[in-house]
Structure formats: C-alpha cells, structure tokens
Image: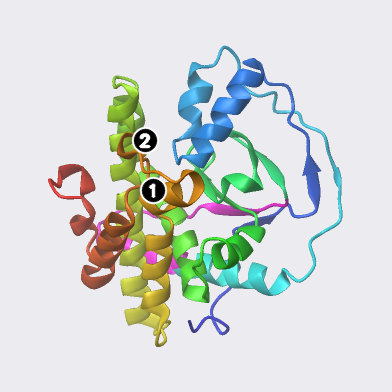
Amino acid sequence: MRWEDGRRSDNIEDRRGMRVSRGKMGGGIGTLILVLVALYFGVDPSIILDEAPMGIDPTVETRSASRPSGEDHLAEFVSVVLADTEDTWNAYFQSMGQRYVPPKLVLFTGAVNSACGFAEAAMGPFYCPADGKVYIDLSFYRDLKNRIGAPGDFAQAYVIAHEVGHHVQNLLGISDKVQIARRRMNETQGNQLSVRLELQADCLAGVWAHHADRARRILEDGDIEEALNAASAIGDDRLQERSQGRIVPDSFTHGTSAQRVRWFRSGLETGDINQCNTFASDRL
C-alpha cells in the first residue's frame, strides 16, 4: 500500500502509555462484564449502558505508564489511513449534499475509558457512537498478523476503514435505528441485525478503498488479497471454530467469512454506498 507520502490526520488522540482505572460503575461488576462482552461481539456498548441503573463515573484516575516501543511507524500509518478516510468521505458526503464530520481516533495501551464504557485491548478495535471516536491498541496489529493470520498494511488499513464505516453509519442515522430496533428483539434477532450492521461497515470500507485508489492510487499488487484475507479471517465462523471448535450461527454478530468478503468486495468494486444496503438484502 502506498501511504508514506499521504497526509497525516489532525484527529489522532494519543493516550498510549496511560494506565486507566475502571472508575465507578453504577451498575456493578455485572454491567462491566456485559459491556466487555458487547465490545467483543461487536454490539454497541451504549445499549447496555443505557439500560444500566447508573452510568460510569466520568472521573477516572490515570497515571503515566511505560509507552510501547516500536509503534511510532504504526501510529504514523494509522494517521495517514485516517486522513485518507477523511478525504474520501468528505468528498462523498459533499456529493450527497451533506457534511462529513470526521471521527477522532484514540490510540491507547492496554485499556481505555470511552463514552461507551471501559474496554481492554483484548476486545480489539471498536467504534463508540456515543462520542464518535474509533479506539485501537496498536498491539492488535500484531495479533492480526500472528494469531489471526492476516498480515499486510492494507489488511491493517481495512480494520480502520471498517471502524470508520461505523462512524458513517452513525452520521447517516443508521446506528440509532438499529439500536432502537434491537431493544424490541430477542437475542437471536438482535444478533442478526448486528450482522447486517457489521457487513454494511465492511461494504463501506470497500467504498473507501475504491475511491481512495481512484483518487490517490494507494493500492499495490497483493493489497486487495490482503484485505479480503483479513475479512475472511475474522468471520464469525472462522473465529468460533478456532476458539471453541464448533460453529453456532445464532450467536453470529459480524457475519461469516464468505459474507464479510462478499460485502467488502461489493463496496470495493462499485464504490457506491447504495450497494451497501445489507438491511434490504435477502442474501447476505
């Protein structure tokens, strides 16, 4: 992926090297566990927090910790990819007669407090609609390469583009509609709706890649394969089989490997946000 000469984003919030306390959780430890589970399975954590008796105390204690070494190159890469999503979506929203408000991207180490709750690095990157920020511990990229088997810089870019896709959904009002609908559903139905939300974010990541490459020629040989491999590697079926040795479709929240690849490819090939309506599609 050609990125070294790209613009750096001003919307990076670097909290690396800060150790974060959990703060006071009004809903108790049960609420904390539910929030962590929600993050792991891609569910909007604010759904749980909204239903808890009390939220998280906004005052938390932080203190300096050792900052991870060898991450400066990755942090710069993330800044360039974020800037590219800003340029792409700003132009796309203008073409729709709308204004794009870019998200902040928070770099953290180990754990972080967001408007959606406390989260640990093991939960992976996530987007919090309550504060409009993307959160990522850069150690995730090591896991993406070594544990998940999806190496490559464009695979890393796909992860950011997917989370920014959730921000696009938030700006368009899609996330709010899904959140409201989930409250009227049972767990299985809610999971199915979550799958459609996640697959749409995959498609939006593909839309970004399509327009970014046309405008700035960012793609090199093998980049598309890297992204498709990443999409496939983090499908619910692949992850469940790897972690528990069996597949439970009713518990899917992100979609199968084939579905994730299909929707990313749809956005990549068309560059058309209208081709990302997973909610109206009979075939995921």
Label 2 is placed on what type of residue? Answer: Ser
Residue at 19% across / 58% down in the picture?
A: 275
The figure's colour scheme reads rainbow
- Could you tell me residue 32's position as x and y percent? 62, 26
Asked whether residue 168 is drawn in magenta, I would say: no
Residue at 52% across / 61% down in the picture?
A: 148
Q: In the image, is 136 to the left or to the right of 48? A: right
Residue 161 visible? The answer is: yes
Classed neighbour count for the residue bearing mark 2: other residues with Cα under 10 Å, few (<14), some (14–19), many (≥20)? some
- Could you tell me residue 104's position as x and y percent? 57, 52
State the extent of the magenta-drawn residues as a range. 85-109
User: Pointers 1 and 2 in contact (CB under 8 A)?
Assistant: yes
- Helix, strand or loop at label 1? It is helix
> What residue sits right under mark 1 in the picture?
236
What label sits on residue 165 in the rendered view?
Answer: none
Distance, label 1 to label 2, CA atoms, is: 9 Å
> What residue sits right under mark 2 in the picture?
251
Residue at 37% across / 35% down in the picture?
A: 251
